[in-house]
Amino acid sequence: MLFGKRDQLFGLDIGSSSLKMAEVRRTGKGYQLVNAGTVPVPPESIVEGAVMNAPAVVDAILELLEKHKPATRNVATAVSGHSVIIKKITLPHMSEEELEQSIQWEAEQYIPFNIQDVNLDYQVLSNGKDKDVGEGADQMDVLLVAAKRDLVEDYAGLLREANLRPVLMDVASFAVENMIEANQPVEDDEVIAVFNIGASITNVNIFRKGGPLFTRDIHFGGNQYTEAIQKKAHVSVQEAEKRKVAVGDTSRVSDVVREAVDGVTESLLNELQRSMEFFLTSSEGERIHRVILAGGCSALAGLAERMQERLGTSVVLADPFQSITFDPNRLDPKYLQEIAPLMGVSVGLAIRKVGD
C-alpha cells in the first residue's frame, strides 16, 4: 500500500530549531526503533510554537523524509505554546454519553478562547464511582485539552504540503510522558515532574501513572542561553551555539560565557521552581518524587546538578531509547546517543497507533 499499514505511523516533532523523527515497531518483547534522525529548521521559521515561514519548514520536512525514508506516510505530530490550553476540571458524575453532550458547554467556562475557534478533546482521569463514599463519589475529574484551530491547521498544512498524512495530533508534554512510561517503570503512587527544555519553549508536566496532574508551557529555553552568550561574549549566533555546547569544557569556555550561562540557568530554575511550588500548594498532601529532564537543552553541562541542588529532588536525564531496542547494523549507536536528548517528543509520538 502507498501509505503502509493502516495502523502504522511515525512521530515528527516540529521544533523551532530542528525537526526530529522516530519510527518505532511494536514487537512481542516491547518496542524496536527502526528509524530516527533530525534536520535543522531555518531560524525564525517556528517561533514559540507558531508557524512563521511555512515554505522553509516544508522544505526541512522534505529533506528529513529524503534522508531517513520512513516506511509510511502516516504521521503523528505535537503542538505546544500559548495556543494550547490544558485544564483539569471536576464535574458531577455522569455517563459517557452525557459527558460527550455537555463537554463543550463545560469547556466554555475554562477555555479563554472562543470555543468555536478551538479543537477540543478530553479524557476522564478518575470516575466518581471508583471513589469511596464521602470522598467525591458523586464527582469525576476530567482533563480538557484545547488547541486553537488555526494552529492545528497550520501544522496539518505543513504535513500535507510534504505529501504526508497527518493522523494524530498530540500535546508535546503528553508525548514526552508517553515516552517516559514506555522506557522506565513508574510506580502507581509516584509523582514525576518532567521538564522538556526545547529551544524556545519548556514544557512542564507533573504526572502520576495514568494521567497528568499539572501542565504548563514556559516560553523559555535554549535560545536564551545562546542570546546571553552572544551579547556577553560579542560573538555570532553560530559561535554562541558552539560555546553553549562546550560550556562544560573549562579549557574552551571563558569566564564570561560561564557567567552568561549561569545567569540564564538561574532564571530558568526560578521559573521551574515557581511551577513546582504552585503545584504543591494547590495539591494538598502531594510531593514530587523525582524530576526528569528532556529536550535539547537538558544535557547542558551542570544543569541537572544545579537543578537537583535547587529543587531538593532527584534529577535525571530522560533516555528515549532506554528500553527500546534497535539493530546496530541499521542505526548508529553513537548517533542515537548524540541525538537522544532531542528525541523525547518524537519517540513518544512514534509509539502511538492510528486511532489512539
Image (spheres, rainbow, N blue to C red):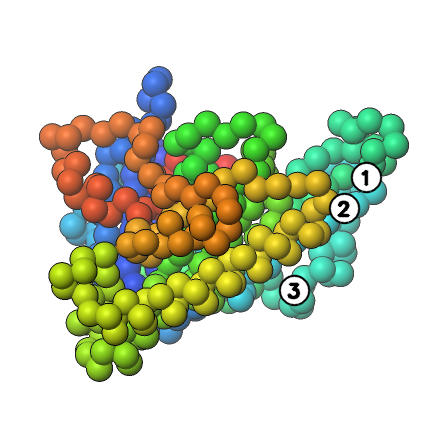
> Above or below — where is 286 with respect to 158?
above
Residue at the far left in the pictured view = 329
Return the residue nearer the eye: 72 or 86. Answer: 86
User: Up-down: is 223 above or below 31?
Assistant: below
From the viewer's perspective, is the residue at label 3 or at label 1 nearer?
A: 1
- Residue 278: give its label: none
Amino acid at circle 3: Gln
Residue at label 3?
116
Residue name at image x 24 percent, y 70 percent: 255
* Crowd class of label 3 (few under 14; some 14 to 19; many from 20; radius 10 Å): few
Q: Which residue is mark 1?
A: 139
* Quadrant that contains the N terminus: top left
Q: Which mark is residue 90?
A: 2
Disc on the earlier residue, 2 or 1 = 2
C-alpha gap between disc 2 and disc 1: 7 Å
Residue 236 visible at all? yes
Of helix, strand and loop, which one carries label 3?
Answer: helix
Measuring from the top left, give residue 186's x and y in whole percent. Answer: 50, 30
**Is label 1 in a helix, a strand or a loop?**
strand
Coordinates of residue 324 in the picture (x, y in percent): 31, 30
* x 43%, y 44%: residue: 315
The amino acid beneath tag 1 is Gln
Q: CA distance from mark 3 to mark 1?
A: 27 Å
Which residue is nearer to you in this view: 299 or 211? 299
